[in-house]
Amino acid sequence: MTGVTAFRLPALLARAADRGLEPGLTTWAADTLPSMVPALVERWGLTMGAPYEPGGQCSWVAPGTTPSGDAVVLKVTWRHPEAEHEADGLRFWNGDGVVRLHDEVATDDTRALLLERCTPGTWLKDSMPPQDQDVMLAGMLRRLWRRPPDGHPFPSLASMCDHWARDYESRADAVADRRGWDRGLLSEGVALYRELPRTSDDDVLLCTDLHPENVLAAQREPWLVVDPKPHVGDRTYDATQHMFNMDRLHTDPGALSDRMAALLDLDPERLRLWLFARCVQEAPEWDGMYEVAAQLAPWVRSRSA
């Protein structure tokens, strides 16, 4: 398909727009995106395929080919704080373990990225056993953790945690009452969530969203990271996202946390604290996270006894 002759929204983006929880996203998907995509295709002279399914909740992403025959991906994203510095991060890492950024266009409500395409593009999660995924992701994180230069554009991990803590506190009471959750446990978790990013003495550029569905099989390197959400802060935080995608988190979170700490040469106690704090913060929206936090709570409380 040359150009975009039959524009459509992939499933997750269509669902997010229909729900209307983010009015800006709903308006963008209906009014801006359908004309923005063809304009970008024309700008870069792309021959396009259909968008990836089910896709993401805030982006339209599809494979394409440049006039010179390079395999690329066109990613058109509704601008929101979490993804604001993806292009900056890709430029900083410059293809070392991540997809390359070929070009970028930004408007008031849109960021469009022309990216290297991973071929065959198979997810890491579908390509090796979970224990091997741990080792692979640990290696990727070690490559990404670098100190950015003075004057860098990246926001702090502390600012991100403050944002999500405020969001959590606006709805946690109602959820706790409905589900009969331990208010003390929740208070301990969100307090740690605010405190931990401020007690790091070795801040680096973090991916913050590295998990087995954001690492794809490629040709330039065996595996490349996609969709980073860069922030500067405590590298221990970066070990948590992968654990949320593992069934082992629900059966023995302490053992999984200790394994990742060993693979990444992190303080195992600090990683357990981060895991507990993140499980509390995610609990209102992510089924099973409160139960994981409850498994970790006796250990957390024993430290302060």
Image (cartoon, rainbow, N blue to C red):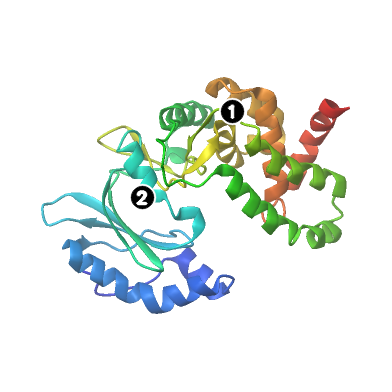
Q: Who's the residue at 64% across and 34% down the image?
A: 248
Q: Are marks 2 and 1 in contact (CB under 8 Å)?
A: no
Task: Give residue 232's position: percent from left, percent from top.
Answer: 51, 39
Evaluate whether residue 202 shows in this view. yes
Q: Nearer the viewer, residue 122 or 95?
A: 95
Secondary structure, mark 1, is loop
Position in image of residue 14 (x %, y %): 47, 70
User: Residue 95, located in which quarter of the rendered image?
Assistant: top left
Residue 285: horizontal and vertical position, in percent? 67, 56
Q: Residue at x 42, y 32 (%)?
A: 144
**As drawn, is 76 to the left or to the right of 3?**
right
Residue sitting at 65 percent across and 32 percent down? 199
Judge left or right: residue 278 versus residue 298. left
**In the rendered image of this protein, does residue 108 appear above or below residue 247?**
below
- Mark earlier in primary sequence (2, 1): 2
Q: How many marks?
A: 2
In the rendering, which numbered label is found on residue 201?
1
Mark 2 crowd level (few <14, some 14–19, many ≥20, 10 Å Cα): many
Find residue 181 and report its horizontal and vertical position in percent: 84, 51
Few, some or many C-alpha atoms within 10 Å of disc 1 (few <14, some 14-19, many ≥20)? few
How many angstroms separate mark 2 from mark 1 (CA)? 26 Å
Q: Where is mark 2, residue-wise?
A: 87
* Element type at mark 2: helix
Of 233 and 252, the residue lying toward us: 233
Q: Which numbered marker is on residue 66?
A: none
Q: Residue furthest left?
A: 68
In this view, 125 is above or below 256: below
Side (left or right) of 239 relative to 117: right
Q: Quadrant of the N terminus?
A: bottom left
